[in-house]
Image: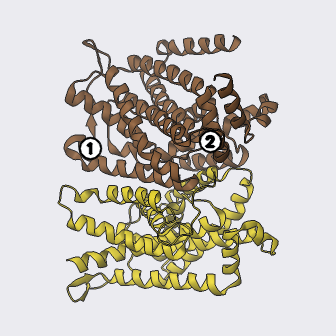
Chain colours: A yellow, B brown
Amino acid sequence: MLAQLIVSGLAAGSLYGIMALGLILIYKTTHILNFGQGDMAMFSTFIALLLFRNYGLPLPAALGAALVVGALLGIVIDRGLLRWAKNAPVTSLFIATLGVGMILQAIALWMGLIDSRPFPYVLRGPPVFIGDVVLRQHDLVVFGVALAVSLLLFAVFKFTKVGIAMRATSQNKRAAQLMGINVGRIGTWSWALGLGTGAIAGCLVAPIVFLDLSSMIFVMIKAIAAAVLGGFTSLPGAVVGGLLLGVIENLFSGYMPPAIAPLKTTFVFTLIILVLVFRPHGLLGERSVGGHG
Amino acid sequence: MKRIIFWTLVVALLALAPLVLRSYNLYLLNLAAVKVIAAVGLALLTGFTGQLSIGHAGFLAIGAYGTALLAQYFGIPFWVGIPLAGLLSGLAGFILLIPALRLSAIYLAIATLAFGTAVAEALPRWASVTGGYQGMRVPRANLFGLDVQNDVAMFYLALAMVVVLILMARNLVRSRVGRAFIAIRDKSAAAQACGVSLARYKALAFFVSALYAGLAGGLYAHVVGYISPAEFGLAKSIDLFIMIALGGMASLPGPVLGALFLTYLPHWLSGFRGLQSIIYGASLIGIVIFMPFGIWGFVRKWTAPDKVRAMPRPLRAVVEFVQGGASRG
């Protein structure tokens, strides 16, 4: 029972974690909390479904296309939109990202893609047994992808010039500029990476929840919670926070009496407020969260 | 003096609205009043005091459910129930004070988001009291035995609440308290150094803002006559934030304009099916890009450019607070 709850919690948590990675990639360098992340991830996933179903593309190619669409979307949003809104305070930029989300929803609606369609699983088959623990094959895919994305991002930030420049920009924008880093281009990179990661999360969530408008938003709220648990500025923190969130949620609904168990989301968000109050830098984030006035 | 006459005329004209407007238009106007009250409350907190909140639907929910439950279980009439539920919501505002004293900007926004989500998720699951996802019918409003649950009566209630609450907000903003709010927003360290108690004034800001949202929620419950948890989710909180950001949050006309805009725009666009959310989304983006300080900021830029330039100067409010404090002892 305990092992089962933990393992399925980890599976859900990996999804929150990947989604949170996308949010933080963007937030770290641009300080914009991308509220349209859910819609944007949904849009890329829709494209994958369209290519797979209507144009007969093999599933792996369709998923790859979703990733590319996500990254392109990021570039278009940064270059085509946010660049023009330089005078706006950062707080209203998040409204602009919401606006983009609404437009994407409408486009998806126009293309006749929205009627809560099932999305294909990458791996479908009999569940896997490890001891007493039952796992869907999809869960194994989720674990694998979460691990791969984390390692890939780790490598990007550790070894590539772009990754190091992104770290520098998030630490001190002006100093990074003085070192010759093109901060604008780094922002575009962050958007591309962030929405690409979002597309991956979308393709993994879609088979579980069906593909419709509201489901991604719910995953996004959970991802924000995961990001807070992890510290909001730390990429490993996002993954750890996501996993922890999934496990806590599952344990709560598994062990609480039936009268309280459905309140798991309320419990999680109360916990988030407490984390923010007592440990605003989360588990792995940098200090100096408050005090910006 | 001119202004007083102008606004008295506006209110008098509005008071005649039930003579011309049909029932549905009146109902729409009532809904607009609900949003105006909530938006003004949020502007006091976010625009004037600089404390972001994207969880205000939680307070609306407390006000609405509070009013409905007080009427249902204790038979309390609406004219006591709405203020009482508003007060309850105001007290709930103190919950956010603790995060507000420790966090700033986006982190506080997330704490408020967490509060809003926690409330929105708890409502449907406490089904024995709130009626669950189906929602609940609000007992009919009753004034000394007279049934006043109709659009016209609710319109006068809404109009009275809007006028009183906007006047109160205006007085608050122009008082010593308002200067303290603005000082905290502009430079909290400097404000503190000049003797503005962050704890006291942030507490006051959260209380007043949640009170406004609670009163708006109570009014909503009686205007619609039926409430369900779906109406108090994250989307509603974000809508409120959009209203004040679009209208111009550091002013009082701003939230009013924003609330009207968000009530009537979806209504006008309902003819263009499919296009609706594209136009809505595009207008959000357009206003953010071309009117960074909201509709009211844009209007002021043309009508009173010198005042706009003088407005948001850090430390000015701090100085005014100290001077105001000195002159009043």
Foreground label between 1 and 2: 2
Quick check: B47 above or below A8? Answer: above
Are discs 1 and 2 less than 8 Å apart at CB? Answer: no
Mark 2, chain letter? B
Q: Earlier in the sequence, mark 1 or mark 2?
A: 1
Q: Estimate the spatial distance between the alpha carbons at disc 1 and disc 2, rounded to whole Å.
A: 42 Å
Q: Do labels 1 and 2 share a chain?
A: yes
Mark 1, chain letter? B
Q: Residue B325 carries which label?
A: none
Q: Which residue is drawn at 46% across and 56% down?
A: A277
Label 1 Cα neighbours within 10 Å, binned few <14 / some 14-19 / many ≥20 = some
Q: Which mark is residue B134?
A: 1
Q: Which amino acid does label 1 sit on?
A: Gln
Label 2 Cα neighbours within 10 Å, binned few <14 / some 14-19 / many ≥20 = many
Position of the C terminus of chain B, as image quadrant, is top right
Quick check: A7 above or below B211? Answer: below
Direction from residue B123 to residue A155 in the image, left or right: right
Q: Residue at x 49, y 85 (%)?
A: A148
Q: Which residue is drawn at 38% across and 31% down?
A: B87
**Residue B292 horizontal/vertical position (percent):** 70, 45
**Residue B276 horizontal/vertical position (percent):** 54, 46
* Residue that label 2 marks: B184
